[in-house]
Image (cartoon, rainbow, N blue to C red):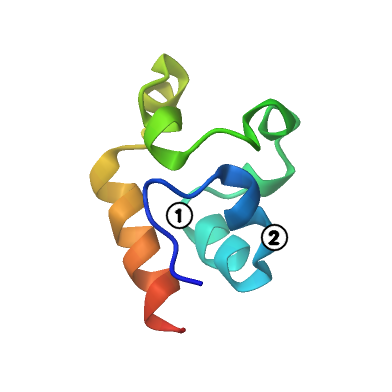
Amino acid sequence: MKLTLDSTVGEVLKDTQAVEILEGYVPGISTNPMLEFAKDMTLRSLLELPQAEQFGITEEMVNQVLEQINARI
């Protein structure tokens, strides 16, 4: 399944290879307890949160990660 900005955080976390790639960009992100609250949010919605900016998570970064994840499909 191709992941997009409209995919949910939960969908990304179900894919172990996607989590490995994501961890390369933001170490520890997959074990952050706050993710439990974000599992039903789309990646696009997540980017709109001020916390995303605080952690340096940008749309460009997410698109790079998605490109890398989808390249292995």
Label 1: element kind: helix
The residue lying furthest to the left in this view is 60
- Frontmost residue, 58 versus 46: 46
Q: Where is mark 2, residue-wise?
A: 14
The quarter of the displayed image where residue 20 is located: bottom right
Q: Position of residue 18 (x, y in %)?
A: 56, 66
In the visual, does 44 lie left or right of 42? left
Up the image or down, 35 lies above or below 16; here it is above
The quarter of the displayed image where residue 41 is located: top right
Up the image or down, 49 lies above or below 42; here it is above
Q: Residue at x 57, y 44 (%)?
A: 9
**Total numbered circles:** 2
Up the image or down, 3 lies above or below 49; here it is below
Q: Are marks 2 and 1 in contact (CB under 8 Å)?
A: no
Q: Earlier in the sequence, mark 2 or mark 1?
A: 2
Label 1: few (<14), some or many (≥20) within 10 Å?
some
Name the amino acid type tagged 1.
Tyr
Q: Where is mark 1, residue-wise?
A: 25
Name the amino acid type tagged 2.
Lys
Q: Position of residue 33 (x, y in %)?
A: 76, 31
State the separation of the CA atoms marked 2 and 1. 17 Å
Label 2: few (<14), some or many (≥20) within 10 Å?
few
Label 2: element kind: helix
- Circle nearer the viewer, 2 or 1: 2
